[in-house]
Amino acid sequence: MKNATKNLYGPLSLIFVVPILLFSVLIKTNLISKNFFPNLTGAIIFAIFMIYGFLSIKLSKKRFTGPTNVDGVTPEYAANGFEFWTISVFLTTLLAAVFPSAPKIFSENFIPFIMVANIFGLLFVSYLYIRGKGTYHDKENDEREGHSTLFKFLRGLEFHPKLFGVDIKQWTNCRYGMISWQIIILLFMYYYFQKNGFNNAIFVTVLLQSIYIGKFFFWETGYFNTLDITLDRAGYYICWGCLVFLPALYTYTTYFLINRSPNISWKTSLIIFLLGVYFTYKNYEVDRQKEIFKRDKENSIIDGKKAEYLDVKYERDGKIVDSKLLLSGHWGFSRHTNYTYEILTSGMRSAVGYQYGPVPFVYLLYIIILLVHRIYRDEAKCSKKYGKYWKEYCKLVPYRLVKGVY
């Protein structure tokens, strides 16, 4: 039954059921347009987003070398993330000012845009699968484990495929997925303001999301050291997820609100905003502590004190490699404190729609499910990598998410 879930039912659910549910929610939410199917406008918008993201990598002179992966590849990325984000916010605002009809055109064609992204995403992931199926790292293990074609299509085959010299995961994850999130919520906000005037609930959620996205691009090179990039392969799960699911669901709270007229007080808005900023900063602080430790190792200073750590070993390419696991700062409270603050900041971005009940919190529910699942997925990979040392680390840091609770 476990193999059937992994090789058949799980992939079928994610590849077929999830898109149907996603589009159903968007169509049910929509009150501002009669456009529900792929159209030329949606295709043009999608093409602009894709080309814009591609060029941001291709034309960048600033480069960052990521860690050597398990397949022996040392990837190289564009390192102009924060500049790219800043320019994108400016250009989107300028577009809305110079062409006031642009936010309306986009908002009324949002669902067709996502539909086009879905068609392209399926074709693109199929291309990646066909391209890589002949030879890829650990192919023998897939054959030995009996992994199905559906499972491999979902997971992906190659860790760092490139297209015309551009790393595909940076393109789909960062320079399309994350930046489309930013551009979309700004266009939604400008559309609502042009039509109905200023709304503090919409302004607060867009501002909190923008701060979070800006933080991501400021830290983009740090993202290249995470498991999303180093150990996840370029398949349906990552690439389709960033091309379709991310711009559709991560923007959902804002999309829901522009289809309604939320009304919350300035006092409530300010409280939500301040809590959201605090949780976003703490989320950054957690990641920053890990980056400091990776850079300075045993000489790291965390929270004003010399960092504590656990010496560990693991095998790579038949050789034993020495490494260290951080035990200080946030990483001494729980093994995934970054996810704790990720959930809390997501809650604040959704809280502005509390008057409508649970629907504006759909994104928060998704984030909780995603991150709890990711905890077990990450820890399975760490257990396999570090073996007995991971067990020792778990004894020293026994909680996964919240110290004393879970």
Image: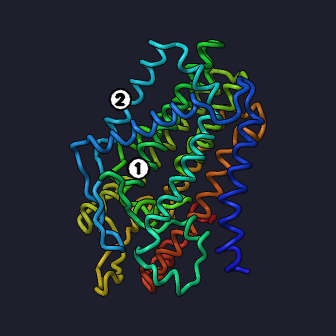
Which numbered dot is residue 178? none
- The amino acid beneath tag 2 is Ile
Judging depth in this view, the residue of 222 and 7 nearest the camera is 7
Image quadrant holding the C terminus, namely: bottom right
- In the image, residue 130 lies at what x, y percent? 49, 65
- In the image, residue 185 lies at what x, y percent? 55, 31
Secondary structure at numbered mark 2: helix
Q: CA distance from mark 1 to mark 2?
A: 25 Å
- In the image, residue 104 lies at what x, y percent? 60, 19
Asked if the residues shown at circle 1 and circle 2 are in contact, with their CB atoms under 8 angstroms apart, the answer is: no
- In the image, residue 116 lies at what x, y percent? 59, 40
Against 209, residue 147 (above or below) is: below
Which residue is at a point 30% across and 73% down the rendered structure image?
72
Q: Nearer the viewer, mark 1 or mark 2?
A: 2
Classify residue 329 by image quadrant. bottom left
Which residue is at a point 65% across and 27% down the rendered structure image?
268
Mark 1 or mark 2: which comes first in sequence? 2
Secondary structure at numbered mark 1: helix
Judging depth in this view, the residue of 304 and 309 nearest the camera is 309
- Residue 405 shown left or right of residue 339 in the figure: right
Classify residue 309 by image quadrant. bottom left
Against 331, residue 176 (above or below) is: above
Which residue is at a point 28% across and 65% down the rendered structure image?
74
Judging depth in this view, the residue of 344 and 378 nearest the camera is 378
Against 69, residue 402 (above or below) is: above
Image quadrant holding the N terminus, namely: bottom right
Residue 48 visible: yes
Which residue is the site of mark 2? 87
Classify residue 317 by image quadrant. bottom left
Residue 211 visible: no
Which residue is the site of mark 1? 285
Q: Give the crowd class for mark 1: few <14, some 14-19, many >=20 residues within 10 Å.
A: some
